[in-house]
Amino acid sequence: MSQHKGKIITALVLLFVVFYAIAVYWSIEPSRFDVVQNAKQQAQQRSEKLVTGYVTTSTLITVADTLLTKSGGYLSNDVLPPSVIMDNMPAWEYGALEMVRDLALSMRKDFSRSQSQSTEHEALKKAQPQFNISSEAWAWPSAEGEYQKGIDYLMVYRSQIANQHERDSQFYSRADNLRSWLKEAEKRLGSLSQRLSASVGQDKVNTDLAGNSSNTQGTYTPLQQQIKTSWWEIDDVFYESRGATWALLHFLQAVEYDFADVLDKKNARVSLQQIIRELEATQETVWSPMILNGNGFGYVANHSLVMANYISRANAALIELSELLAQG
């Protein structure tokens, strides 16, 4: 009997070791890629021309595809071990997915339209909603299946803008279009920065109605409140930020190529490059085996505050870039 128990324990230990090794491998974050070279390769493979918007669209396609094809595939909706007990990589996936959703929406309502009264591009009209299914959906329809459909529609759009005979398929490289998307990115980074900074807790003064004494809101909120991200959630917020900044970094590099003339005319290219540099810092290797949550200037590092610092600086630079684009 004791020998039988010993075999069971040994089997369980081996199973744990195997699951742990798989989880570590699946937790490896995707590498960065050269957005321009990536677009050129895809254009060459498809015998398509590298027109305005091709790099941005290709980058969106590649980032979305990476969610499905990286180590372990898409993990957020898995219901079996070891991925069902993993949380860092699913958080990373969600951060990148949110950036994909924002850019897909901007592609549909801004980049592909000449003015507010113009019609939506049919492929983008179908692509954008596909990315809005719950990231945890695993039954029919599954998240992977819907995201793949969105990628396929984006590929249709990309082929059409590269076709000189498709007059109704365009990508408009304009300052107002770019600024509209950047404003969405600002909100994402601002939210992530606040959640990361709240790892140590902070007293916040309610400024929701600041600016006008006649401003109102639906329900009462106190003038001061304590905001703190739970210790159990802080690593998830950290990796969500890693995924979001990884995706945004590539999107901004693509924008630098497709909106080169606009940026040069506004003398704003250096501002965009500074944002990219700040975001590159968010992708540095994490040498600690776990995300530490020290208190401010305490003995233990606080990885969340470091990440919040880089994101806050990038967000401030984004605001300045938006202002530059708004100027005549």
Image: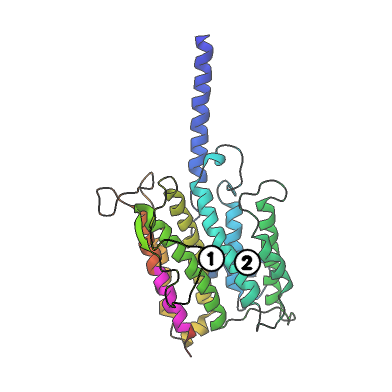
Looking at the picture, how far across and down is residue 254, in whole percent? 53, 71
Answer yes or no: is residue 70 visible: yes
The residue under the point 64% across, 60% down is 131
Give the magenta-colored segment's residue range. 314-325
Question: Residue furthest toward the bottom?
Answer: 328
Is 319 contained in the magenta span? yes
> In screen coordinates, is 25 left or right of 120?
left
Residue that appears at 58% across and 48% down: 76
Residue 222 found in image quarter: bottom left
Q: Is residue 41 in view?
A: no
Q: Foreground mark, 2 or 1?
A: 1
**Foreground pick, 92 / 236:** 236
| Amino acid under disc 2 | Gln
From this view, report whether residue 318 is shown above or below residue 283.
Answer: below
Expressed as whole percent of the image width and height from the top left, the position of residue 37 reads: 54, 68
| Nearer the observer, 125 or 45 | 125
From the image, tell me which residue sits under label 2: 42
Q: Residue furthest top?
A: 1
What's the amino acid at mark 1? Gly
Give the mark nearest the N terminus, 2 or 1. 2
Taking 193 as reference, is 43 left or right? right
Does residue 285 appear left or right of residue 8 in this picture? left
Q: Is residue 55 above or below residue 280?
A: below
Residue in the image at 40% along x and 57% along y: 196
Alpha carbons under labels 2 and 1: distance apart: 50 Å
Residue 71 part of the magenta-drawn span: no
In depth, the one of 170 and 36 nearer the eye is: 170
Give the residue at x 64% y 69%. 44
Location of mark 1 (residue): 218
- Local crowd size for mark 2, using a 10 Å CA cut-off: few (<14), some (14–19), many (≥20): some
